[in-house]
Image (spheres, rainbow, N blue to C red):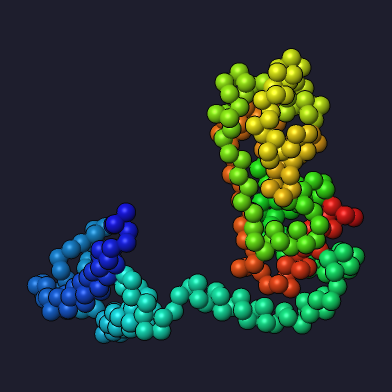
Amino acid sequence: MSDFISNFWSVYITAITLGGIVACAILLWVTSRKKVAASADNTTGHVWDEDLREMNNPLPLWWVGLFIITIVFSLGYLYVYPGLGASPGSQGWTSKGQYAEEVAQANEALKPLYAQFDDQTPEQLAKNTKAMAIGERLFMNNCSQCHGSDARGSKGFPNLADGDWLYGGAPDKIKETLNLGRMGVMPPMAAAVGSPDDVKNVAHYVLSLSGSPHDSLRASLGKAKFGACAACHGNDGKGNQTMGAPNLTDKIWLHGWGEETIIAMINNGKTNQMPVQKDRLTDAQIHVLTAYVWGLSNK
């Protein structure tokens, strides 16, 4: 790990960069002074394709000048911009800084557009055609990569259009999720449940809660062992939105269903993260996006 926090790589890159520029300058100087013995007809003696002869003429001055300009420009560029290892350059420019500046300018220009929605609740905005068109663009640019363009999610990514919410689907909860993100953790529970056979029994009991195909005998044996899971999912298996624990009775399976899938979940646990959006979107944008997401399941 020390290799990545020492200044070795910075020095290494700097040496290679400057070495390449200096080598080009030396090569240009050496070739300009070296004279190739020419024959009486001013050729080097090299012939290709029977009659294509290499003449012994020096490089045109304009061509040499371009090489020199390139070398001078590269040194000036490395002085102004970062390019020599960890050196920030005289201007302190970074791509991240430029991006942040451009985003800030765009947000400032868009303030009047979003200002018209400030005094409306998400429920009211959900009926506003203009606001929903903007919300859809925000969703496509920031959320559809995980939840899909239709917001119906996929395995491991929640469906936002079905009314089933891990942390609650009220506008304030949706806004909280967008602002702060979520970190859902299902710990490995095999040790708390018991033997592998007990784990299998619990899996069938979980399947029985939603009326999914299951072994009724194993389900009856697993009911008592489900107590290890009830702290989060509740004794009735209907989950706990305060903790983000899923409802196990509604046939909505975020990570897939079936005996093998549930056994793997009990044995290995699962961690899911919804990234923080407040660092990427303004309060006004999150307000409109909240209304759009809420409206998906509240037509």
On the image, the x and y values in percent for residue 265 come to 61, 33
* Residue 8 position by quadrant: bottom left
Q: Residue at x 83, y 48 (%)?
A: 163
Residue occupying the point 78% across, 38% down: 238
Q: Is residue 226 left or right of residue 122?
A: left
**158 shown above or below 262:** below
Give residue 45's quadrant in the image: bottom left
Q: What residue is shown at x 68% (from left), y 30% (from top)? A: 227
Give x and y (percent) for residue 141: 68, 62
Q: Nearer the viewer, residue 275 or 140?
A: 275
Q: Residue furthest top?
A: 217
Is residue 83 found left or right of 130 in the rendered image?
left
**Residue 55 seen in the figure:** no
Q: Is residue 275 above or below residue 195?
A: below
Give the percent coordinates (x, y) of residue 255: 67, 38
Question: Percent position (x, y) of residue 198?
Answer: 62, 21
